Amino acid sequence: MDMAKKGDWVQIENVVLPAGSRAPQVPEDTQNCDLKLWVKGIAQEDGKIGENIEIVTATGRKTGGILVAINPRYIHDYGDFQPELLKVEMQLKEIMEGAEK
């Protein structure tokens, strides 16, 4: 589906700071990348992926940007397993059990 209809749940993208406009203390590889913002909301008009559209967010804010997704997924996690954190968890449980005694 490449076409969003008015009322669809969508995601837009905006460039907040173009490459080269970042703070001077930002690492060079980061300086070379745009700082982007993604916002989800209800489409206020029909539009194709890659076109500018207006949306209203769940909090009622009106904004616009380049349509990048229709019915976007929520993708988030805590990253890859870190063995060091398992050791810390086990040590913490041991400390807490000792404090209860």
Image: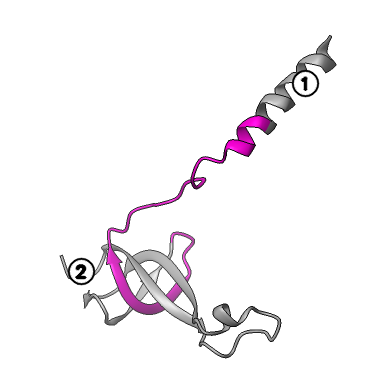
Please say if 100 is above or below 3: above
The reply, left or right, for residue 21 in relation to residue 57 is: right
Q: Which residue is mark 2?
A: 5
The reply, left or right, for residue 79 in relation to residue 25 is: left
Is residue 54 found inside the magenta-colored segment of the image? no
Q: Which residue is mark 1?
A: 96
Q: What residue is shown at x 40% (from left), y 52% (from top)?
A: 75
| Neighbours of disc 1 within 10 Å: few (<14), some (14-19), many (20+) | few
Q: Quadrant of residue 96?
A: top right
Q: Amino acid at mark 2?
A: Lys
- In the displayed image of the protein, which residue is found farthest to the top? 101
Q: Quadrant of the C terminus?
A: top right
Please say if 36 is above or below 58: below
Per the image, label 2 sits on a secondary structure element best described as: loop
The reply, left or right, for residue 20 in relation to residue 14 is: right
Per the image, label 1 sits on a secondary structure element best described as: helix
Instruction: Tell me residue 84's x, y (percent).
Output: 63, 38
Instruction: Tell me residue 42's x, y (percent).
Output: 34, 65
Q: What residue is shown at x 57% (from left), y 83% (from top)?
A: 31
Instruction: Tell me residue 73's x, y (percent).
Output: 33, 54
The image's colouring method is: one colour
Q: Nearer the viewer, residue 94 or 12?
A: 94
Which comes sooner in the sequence, label 2 or label 1?
2
Q: Quadrant of the N terminus?
A: bottom left
Is residue 71 found inside the magenta-colored segment of the image? yes
The stretch in magenta equals 58-87
| Neighbours of disc 2 within 10 Å: few (<14), some (14-19), many (20+) | some
Q: Nearer the viewer, residue 73 or 44?
A: 73
Give the CA separation, mark 2 to mark 1: 54 Å
